[in-house]
Amino acid sequence: MQSRNLALVIAGILSLPAFAHAEAATDLDEVVVTATRTQVALADSLFPAQVIDHDEIVRSQARSLTDLLRGRAGIDIGNQGGLGKNSTVFMRGTESDQVLVLIDGVRVGSVTAGLTAFQDLPVDQIDRIEIVRGPRSSLYGSEAIGGVIQIFTRRDEGAFAPRLRVGTGSHGLREASGGIGGGSERGWFGADVAYQRTDGINACRGSASLFQGCFVDEPDRDGYRNSSANLRGGVRVSDSLELQANALRAQSRNEFDGGPYGGNVAENVQQVLGAKLAWSPTARIDVTAQLGRNDDRSENFFDDESGSLRVGNFDTSRRTASLQADFGLAVGQLLSAGADWQRDAVESDTAFDVTRRDNTGVFVEYQGQFGSHRLQAGVRNDDNEQFGSHTTGSLGWGMAFADNYRVTANYATGFKAPTFNDLYYPFFGKPDLRPEESRGYNIGVAQYAQRYSWTVNAYETRIDDLISYDSSIFLPNNIDQARIRGIELTFDTTVGEWDLSTQLSHADPRNHTPDRGGSSNANRGNVLARRARNTGRIDVDRAFGAFAFGASVKGASHRYDDAANTVRLGGYATLDLRVSYAFDPDWTLEARVDNAFDRGYETIAWYNQPGREYGLSLRWAPAR
């Protein structure tokens, strides 16, 4: 019922006769780099993309990356108990480990579990986020089946200036962040630190007797704390040569409900290091070289009245290097070619048969404009030490019409290499697993005007050789197939003084595994676990002089927590309210109410979500 009410609200907003009075709501010059690995105007991208810029991040008052992403086009979130708890991001109905995540161009994620610790990436360190939906393996290789999310940390320009924010809120929330940054045409530098801590809620209502949820009875609060630091800088050596480097480190302590075998406390580290050289020897040639390293570390403990017991650790790393050259063949004609190298490694108390593997990828991409037509084509080959050679490709076409209408169509293939857990986890790994493979289609229609913009994208993705537990051999195996169909709508405008953004998604992710050997597949036709078929959000904001007001409605339809579709989790819709008051040009007081109607819901069975929460913060940002 809540999801139905959300749909009615959205339909009512879309029917407003406001186009004729709308003012500038869309920045037509906004660029995106993730879709092509080159700068392209967002309106000209042949693959569905969106940008969450710094102003929107600040205005939202979101206190976690998952809250910032929740309900956006093509995105669904699973969370295990509130702020700081393990969170998964499903894009276009694909698994969370089928979404590639980059931070400042550096590939991140655990090489054992295959997941990115979204919950540990601090919002206060983020400048902007680019989201590209659909397969992008032809540019990035493994994992980019559902899409790519790239997070950019701050890059300061202009006079050096400090900044500070302190905050408090429900469940013992306390926060602080601050930094300084600035630069000129010849160089720039910035540094930021942030701290966040909460007493949390009872994350899991699990049952030891029923062997459900977290499999224990621990009705206590599960706290969380995170401290982070970010350094970055760059220097323009000459008019044709620029060097830059960045470092992000986030340390967290996460309490959860668990037992002596898996622990109930995790101490985690997320670290990203990167260095980049950009050289433009001529007006038509750009060369970029980049080095990166991501460390994902987790050490688990079991704490009780008798003391603390160390359970185990997983320290994984990804070292990457890339070289890319972009050649301007003629006006509107760009050819890109490059090579990527990656080394995944793991150190753990758990004995893996293999602890390191290398991957080398080479790619070429062409982008061309012919009058009102645009063309993009790419191919990539990855040579992996474990699974050998794999080739992927993509082809996109677009056409512009009068009044800034655009139509696009694309086809792309993707793949995902098995994780170290899939391959080598003692007694549960299978070393001869094959990569998962996908092919996807997308057709889009859009209009990008000065006063408003809207997009509609319909897609289908088919995935073969999905890795699932095979009960016949008691191991993971390439036994499943999936077919995902969906449609996404985005709409942005300004009505009078009101900024309005609407995003709606429908995904139908189904198990499409055929019957084999005379036996039927009991799960064929079922919805893939933990994905809501309908998601959406509405964001409304307005400034009244020194005051600013905003509201967000986020919702999702029901989902199933298991492959058999027997455990049903109801849909939900929540309302978040926010207000800010700039009582001085340099000082702003912010207040928010999340889940204002105190709705109860779960995105993963047996794991609680916070009810109504309040927050108050003070922001100091002197004008440059």
Image: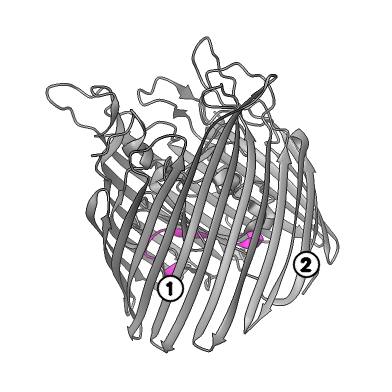
| Residue at the right extreme of this rendering | 583
Local crowd size for mark 1, using a 10 Å CA cut-off: few (<14), some (14–19), many (≥20): some
Local crowd size for mark 2, using a 10 Å CA cut-off: few (<14), some (14–19), many (≥20): some
Residue 15 appearing in the image? no
Question: Does 546 sit above or below residue 506?
Answer: below
- Horizontally, residue 156 falls left or right of residue 509, namely right
Residue at disc 1, secondary structure: strand
Quadrant housing residue 54: bottom right
Q: Which residue is mark 2?
A: 162
Residue at disc 2, secondary structure: strand
In reply to whether residue 606 is colored magenta, the answer given is no
Q: Which residues are magenta?
A: 43-56
Q: Nearer the viewer, mark 2 or mark 1?
A: 1
Front-lying residue, 278 or 367: 278
Q: Amino acid at mark 1?
A: Ala
Q: Amino acid at mark 2?
A: Pro
Q: Position of residue 202 (x, y in %)?
A: 66, 25
Front-lying residue, 279 or 543: 279
Looking at the picture, the colour scheme in use is: one colour
Picture residue at 56% right of the left edge, 85% below the top: 237
Q: Which residue is mark 1?
A: 289
> Disc number at residue 490?
none
Q: Position of residue 177 (x, y in %)?
A: 74, 55
Question: Does 465 sit above or below residue 622?
Answer: above
